[in-house]
C-alpha cells in the first residue's frame, strides 16, 4: 500500500503520530509532504527519526502556521502541484487542521477518493477567543463539504465533531511499551511533577505556573515542563524547571524520573505526552477536557480536575500517600497495552485506508 501523509506542523505530537504509523506499517510505503517548524526542530533533524527505506519526504515550502489568505493560497496551489503526481496512491492521510482544509480541497479537485483527515486537536475548541472559535467552526464545516473521512484520535474529540454536525469516527492514539531510563543523578527524594509538550496557550502554562506556586513551601517538590515554546515566559515560578526541546530518549528519561504527570491543557486530541507517561507507569492528574477525559479511569490510574484547588488537593494526596504512585502507575501501564497500543492503532488506520 502507498500512503501519502500531508503534514503542515512537522513537529511535536504530529511527528510522533506519523512516525508511529510508519514504524508499525513496515510493509507499506509512505510519502510525507511536510511543512517546517524550525523554531521547534529543523526538518532535516525530524527526517532522521524515520526509517529511510520506507519514506519519501517532500518539502511543502509554502505551508505555515496560522491563517493568512495570500500565504495559504500559495500553499494550496503548491500542494496541488505535489499531489497531482500521486493521484494513484492508495490513500491520502491529512494531519492537523491546516493540512485537512487545504488537502481535502486539493483531493476534491484531483478526484482522489480515499482521503482521511485526522485533526489531532480540534481547532474550534480554542478558548482564548470566541471569534476564533466561530471562524474555525466554519472552516471545519466548509472543509468537510470537500469530502474525506474525519478520523479523530479520541472518542471525545470525535464527539465534538459530531456535535458540530460533522460525521466522525475515532481511532485512539497509541504508544509502545518502554523501559524506564534514569541517569545516575536521579534523586529519589524529589517529588517531581512533569508535563511534556509545547509551551503555548492550548496547554495553559499559566495554570501550570499557578499550581506550581501553591507548592513553593515544599522544597522537595519540583515541577518540570519538558519542551519549549513561545509562552515560555509565563512559567515564572522558581520551582519550575524548563528542559527545552529534547530528543525522544531524553524526553523519556525526564518522564522516568517523574513521580506523576500533570496536564493543564485546555483541550487535546489524545496527548502522546500523557501516553508516554502511562507507558512509564506514571499516575495522571489531568485537566477535565476533551482528549484527557478519555484516558482517566477514576481511582485506578489518576484523576481529572476542574479547578486549580482541586489539582493541588490531588497532588497533595500523592505526596502524603506515596505508596499509591506504584499502584496507579501500574494500571496506567496496563491500560496502554490494552486500549492505547501503537500497533493496534496503526492496524486500524490501515483498515481505514483500504475502505
Image (tube, grey):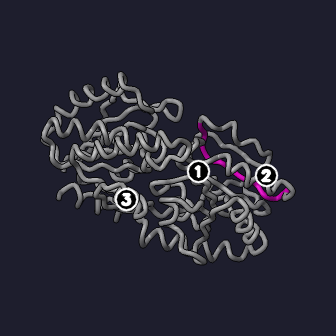
Depth check: 208 or 328 in front? 208
Residue 246: horizontal and vertical position, in percent?
58, 42
Q: Which residue is mark 1?
A: 196
Q: Secondary structure at mark 2?
A: helix
Identify the residue shown where x is 42% and y is 73%.
338
Q: Is residue 308 above or below residue 123?
A: below
Identify the residue shown where x is 72% and y is 53%.
223
Measure the C-alpha gap from mark 3 to mark 2.
37 Å
Asked whether 221 falls inside the magenta stretch, the response is yes
Identify the residue shown where x is 60% and y is 43%.
227
Q: Quadrant of residue 166?
A: bottom left
Mark 3 crowdedness (10 Å alpha carbons): few <14, some 14-19, many ≥20:
few
Measure the C-alpha gap from mark 2 to mark 1.
19 Å
Which of pointers 1 and 3 indicates the residue nearer the eye? 3
Can residue 132 be seen here? The reply is yes
- Residue range (magenta): 219-229
Which of pointers 3 and 2 indicates the residue nearer the eye? 3
Instruction: Say which mark, if any, is on residue 94.
Output: none
Q: Is residue 65 above or below residue 203?
A: above
Depth check: 175 or 177 in front? 175
Tell me which label, 1 or 3, sits earlier in the chain: 3
Q: Which residue is mark 2?
A: 213
Q: Which residue is mark 3?
A: 163
Amino acid at each position: 500500500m502507498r500512503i501519502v501523509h500531508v503534514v503542515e506542523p512537522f513537529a511535536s505530537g504530529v511527528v510522533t503520530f506519523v512516525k508511529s504509523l510508519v514504524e508499525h506499517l513496515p510493509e507499506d510505503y509512505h510519502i510525507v509532504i511536510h511543512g517546517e517548524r524550525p523554531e521547534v526542530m529543523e526538518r532535516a533533524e525530524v527526517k532522521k527519526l524515520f526509517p529511510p527505506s520506507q519514506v519519501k519526504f517532500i518539502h511543502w515550502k509554502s505551508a505555515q502556521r496560522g491563517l493568512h489568505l495570500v500565504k495559504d493560497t500559495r500553499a494550496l496551489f503548491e500542494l496541488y502541484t505535489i499531489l497531482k503526481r500521486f493521484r494513484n496512491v492508495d490513500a491520502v492521510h491529512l494531519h492537523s487542521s491546516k493540512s485537512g482544509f487545504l488537502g481535502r480541497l486539493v483531493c476534491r479537485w484531483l478526484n482522489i477518493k480515499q482521503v482521511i483527515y485526522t485533526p489531532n486537536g480540534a481547532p474550534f475548541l480554542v478558548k482564548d477567543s470566541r471569534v476564533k472559535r466561530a471562524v474555525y467552526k466554519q472552516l471545519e464545516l466548509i472543509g468537510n463539504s470537500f469530502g474525506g473521512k474525519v478520523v479523530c484520535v479520541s472518542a471525545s474529540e470525535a464527539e465534538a465533531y459530531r456535535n458540530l454536525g460533522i460525521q466522525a469516527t475515532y481511532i485512539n492514539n497509541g504508544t509502545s511499551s518502554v523501559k524506564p531510563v534514569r541517569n545516575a543523578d536521579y534523586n529519589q527524594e524529589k517529588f517531581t511533577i512533569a508535563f511534556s509538550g509545547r509551551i503555548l496557550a492550548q496547554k495553559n502554562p499559566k495554570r501550570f505556573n499557578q499550581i506550581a506556586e501553591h507548592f513553593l513551601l515544599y522544597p522537595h517538590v519540583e515541577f518540570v515542563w519538558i519542551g519549549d515554546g513561545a509562552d515560555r515566559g509565563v512559567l515564572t515560578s522558581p520551582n519550575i524547571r524548563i528542559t527545552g526541546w529534547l530528543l525522544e530518549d531524553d524526553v523519556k528519561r525526564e518522564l522516568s524520573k517523574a513521580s506523576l504527570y500533570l496536564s493543564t491543557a485546555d483541550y487535546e486530541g489524545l496527548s502522546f505526552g500523557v501516553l508516554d507517561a502511562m507507558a512509564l507507569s506514571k499516575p495522571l492528574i489531568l485537566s477535565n477536557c476533551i482528549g484527557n477525559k478519555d484516558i482517566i479511569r477514576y481511582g485506578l490510574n489518576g484523576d481529572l480536575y476542574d479547578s486549580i484547588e482541586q489539582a493541588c488537593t490531588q497532588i497533595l494526596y500523592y505526596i502524603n500517600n506515596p505508596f499509591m504512585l506504584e499502584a496507579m502507575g501500574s494500571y496506567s501501564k496496563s491500560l496502554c497495552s490494552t486500549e492505547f497500543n501503537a500497533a493496534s492503532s496503526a492496524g486500524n488506520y490501515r483498515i481505514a485506508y483500504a475502505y
